[in-house]
């Protein structure tokens, strides 16, 4: 295959020309081929709670969801999502008109952008951005406008950490008359940044002032550490009516393969997203929807234990990476650590990640692919810590050989 027809016209739609295979697929394939430890693609190596797995089996056996579920999602899941938003954040939604179940957050992002954008609309996204944002903005005919998160030093309790922060002036300066939508992600993949109450308040003010829609990807809402707090943007004044909030069961319950995601927003916004979603998958994951309805009602202790476990794993991997010689940006959320490879005298994250399995049997993700400004992220490499402790230990042991 040359990718060309006889008329020499490229087969691939030109909007997708810059998007080849996703870096996650490429790096997971590399891990399989080389037998390296995969700290690239973010998926846990331990499944979520046994009782939730059993709930899915029960739904399958009882014939719940084996045929097309209702378009907006099964009522049990929609009411569980509404109860979760109310209990956690004090946000109320109508389960019939203000909730939409999707095939993972990925479909929610796609449907939101396809449903809300006109060709030529500008979309502001925080760079480095999750890769599907760029592809979906392009499929919708929009223009992406990146605002770069930049490293800062922050001291707290006598400890200095390097972290990524949003420059609010840069964000304000990026808004033009063509800006339709802010596409946010907090906690942020890949940097682990959790936007603060002050930052979110400023973003909300800007969105109201410039009459912008906001799509906010909050799939890591339960994965926050230390004193960081996840605050949904929809809770700020003037935001409920302009915000499409997206989340997913994949991260919170460690079932990334089930692909159950959801949208909460006011009726007109959900209706726009649903219009696009109907023609993408129509519906998905019937039996899993029933199981996730149960998962969302797990007691607080589940969420607390999960978070404490991941915080410990973050420290384990972070300490190992520092000892190996990486510059580590301390994440306050997600299950990723971004590092810098400049201390090894290396500058090209992509080349580094391609060679890493050969050099020491570990796979990671080059953040450089998540930037429009390649210089900003050229030497950044991301590792995930949603793996068993002994896997993390073995990986960091292997990485100690890098400096030699
Ligand atoms: N958004 C972000 C920021 C992610 O990291 C991911 C990765 N899994 C997704 C969306 C996709 O979520 P899902 O697997 O539910 O489609
Ligand atoms: N969200 C996961 C990550 O960032 C991977 C999802 C995917 O493979 N598309 O690693």
Image (cartoon, rainbow, N blue to C red):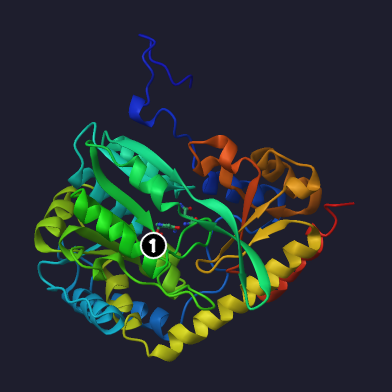
Task: Check mark 1 vs ligand 1: CB closer than 8 Å? yes or no.
Answer: no
In this view, the residue in front, 201 or 290, is 201
Q: Position of residue 174 (x, y in %)?
A: 35, 41
Q: Position of residue 263 (x, y in %)?
A: 24, 63
Which residue was labeled with disc 1? Answer: 199
Residue appearing at x 32%, y 60% in the figure:
202
Residue 22 in view here: yes
Q: Position of residue 167 (x, y in %)?
A: 45, 51
Specify the quarter for ligand 1.
Answer: bottom left
Count of numbered circles in the view: 1
Residue appearing at x 74%, y 70% in the figure:
393
Q: Position of residue 272 (x, y in %)?
A: 14, 51
Crowding at dot 1, Cα within 10 Å, few <14 / some 14-19 / many 20+, comes out as: some
For residue 388, side relative to residue 275 (left or right)? right
Residue appearing at x 44%, y 91% in the figure:
301
For residue 47, side relative to residue 136 (left or right)? right
- Name the element at disc 1: helix
In this view, the residue in front, 117 or 373, is 373
Q: Is residue 38 above or below residue 2?
A: below
Q: Residue furthest top?
A: 7
In this view, the residue in front, 6 or 228, is 228
Q: Is residue 138 above or below residue 364?
A: above
């Amino acid at each position: 295959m040359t990718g060309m027809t006889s008329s020499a016209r490229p087969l691939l739609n030109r909007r997708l020309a810059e998007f080849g295979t996703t870096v996650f697929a490429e790096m997971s394939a590399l891990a399989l081929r080389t037998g390296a430890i995969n700290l690239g693609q973010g998926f846990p190596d331990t499944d979520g709670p046994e009782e939730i797995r059993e709930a899915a089996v029960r739904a399958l056996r009882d014939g719940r969801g084996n045929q097309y579920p209702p378009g907006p999602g099964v009522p049990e899941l929609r009411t569980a999502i509404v109860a979760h938003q109310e209990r956690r954040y004090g946000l109320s939604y109508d389960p019939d008109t203000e909730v939409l179940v999707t095939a993972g957050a990925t479909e929610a992002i796609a449907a939101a952008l396809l449903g809300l954008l006109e060709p030529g609309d500008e979309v502001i996204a925080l760079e480095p951005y999750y890769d599907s944002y760029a592809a979906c903005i392009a499929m919708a005919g929009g223009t992406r406008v990146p605002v770069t998160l930049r490293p800062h030093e922050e001291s707290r309790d006598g400890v200095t950490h390097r972290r990524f922060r949003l420059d609010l002036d840069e964000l304000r300066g990026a808004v033009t008359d063509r800006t339709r939508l802010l596409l946010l992600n907090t906690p942020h993949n890949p940097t682990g940044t959790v936007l603060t109450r002050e930052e979110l308040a400023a973003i909300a003010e800007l969105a109201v002032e410039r009459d912008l829609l906001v799509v906010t990807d909050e799939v890591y809402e339960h994965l926050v550490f230390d004193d960081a707090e996840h605050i949904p943007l929809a809770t700020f004044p003037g935001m409920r009516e302009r915000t499409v909030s997206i989340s997913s069961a994949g991260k919170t319950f460690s079932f990334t393969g089930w692909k159950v995601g959801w949208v909460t927003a006011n009726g007109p916004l959900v209706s726009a997203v649903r219009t696009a979603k109907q023609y993408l998958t129509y519906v998905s994951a019937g039996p899993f929807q029933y199981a996730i309805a149960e998962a969302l009602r797990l007691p607080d202790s589940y969420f607390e234990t999960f978070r404490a476990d991941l915080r410990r794993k973050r420290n384990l991997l972070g300490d190992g990476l520092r000892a190996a010689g990486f510059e580590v940006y301390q994440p306050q959320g997600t299950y990723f650590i971004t590092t810098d490879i400049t201390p090894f005298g290396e500058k090209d994250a992509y080349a580094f990640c391609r060679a890493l399995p050969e050099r020491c049997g570990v796979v990671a993700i080059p953040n450089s692919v998540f930037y429009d400004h390649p210089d900003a992220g050229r030497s950044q490499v991301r590792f995930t810590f949603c793996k068993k402790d002994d896997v993390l230990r073995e990986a960091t042991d292997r990485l100690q050989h890098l400096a030699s």
